[in-house]
Image (cartoon, coloured by chain):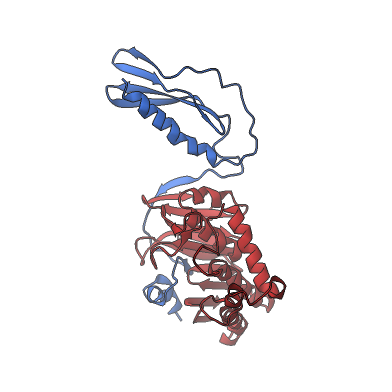
Chain colours: A blue, B red
Amino acid sequence: MNRAIPALILSAAALVPVWRYAPPTATTSTATAEPAPSASTSTSGDSTVVSGPTIDTEKGPVQVQATFKGEKITAVKMLQQPNHPQTEAAVPKLIEETLEAQSADIDTVSGATITSGAYRKSLQAVLDAKV
Amino acid sequence: MRRVEHIMGFPISLLIEDEGTTAEAAEPAFDWLRQVDARFSPFRADSEVSRLDRGELAPHELSPDLAEVLDLCEEYRVATGGAFDVRLPGRGLDPCAMVKGWAVQRAADLLTERGARRLCLNAGGDVAVTGGPWRVGVRHPERADRLCAVLEVGEGAVATSARYERGDHILDGRTGRPATGLLSLTVVAASLTEADATATAAFAMGVEGVEWAASREGCEVFAVSADGKVHRTPGLPVATTT
């Protein structure tokens, strides 16, 4: 299990930048910062639950818990996280989609068509050639 | 009326769909863009930008136009934590990224002030429109002959920054290195000044620029990251299929 703990510390460190992007407004601190012990481990059946140490970040303490089945992580839970939304309400939540190629009836094309060579090969040049 | 000219190093396509509009109606816009090229190009030794860069002009000697452009540059440099910077170390002053959107928006405004109503001005893939609806395709980042989105814009602008052409020409001002992480990023905004500067600045910031652009007031975003995923704001004006 000794191997798992550095991995957890790494995952907590990887999560830290997530909060850095949030605007520094509304930095209400909360009482999540119980004096947390360092990493702890408990096993039930074939699963092992490991709680990482509490890491203090500029937005507050962060502690991650992971469930292992053998060497594989099957679940990750935040035991402590800054009471700070990752994105403010003013920021629209981005929608994720797959990239699809399409052609359609259009009036013009937006794209980085900044050289004349690229322009000659572009859809915009085809549109411009229309009478 | 449709007219294409190459100015400032890129193709500029103008479409005015008002009854009886002649090619001459476009002249004020193209004339303004030629003036901008002469005055603001860092590639012309006698331009105002080159003279400022050589220290031949004091701040109070700047034209109001250049002062306005430099103020906008500073606004975006601060807003992006330095990712958008027109004065990179070891390079001369290069405000092209700001001048383009600003100048093309003004060209469109010059025509609407003279009575144009249904107009679409496309400068190297950056688009300003009035009197829509206009259907604006977004070029697919990996296939020049395909689109990856179609937007419908009545009034406003669409600008795209991408790496598929001219290689890594956008540098992250914070590191001085080429921006990576995104294949293309498109911004829809009320003016091309805002759309183009936001798209360029966000692209320089890489993946985190998508959220930054989405947080800017009045900006809708469509971005393709290097892993081929599309990220867009819910308010993006996606056209209905025809």
Using the image as rendered, state which of residue B170 and residue B173 is in the foreground. Answer: B173
- Please tell me how many numbered marks the rendered image carries: 0
- Name the quarter where the N terminus of chain A is drawn: top left
* Residue in the picture at 36% in, 74% down: A121
Return the residue found at the far right.
Answer: B60
* Residue in the picture at 67% in, 69% down: B67
Decide: is B213 above or below B128. above
* Residue in the picture at 47% in, 55% down: B175
In the rendered view, does B43 fall on the left or right side of B112?
left
Q: Position of residue A87 (x, y in %)?
A: 56, 40
Using the image as rendered, state which of residue A103 and residue B203 is in the foreground. Answer: B203
Q: Position of residue A125 (x, y in %)?
A: 42, 76
* Residue in the picture at 59% in, 40% down: A88
Location of residue B164 by image quarter: bottom left
Q: Position of residue B74 (x, y in %)?
A: 62, 60
Residue B161 seen from this side: yes
Using the image as rendered, state which of residue A67 and residue A90 is in the foreground. Answer: A67
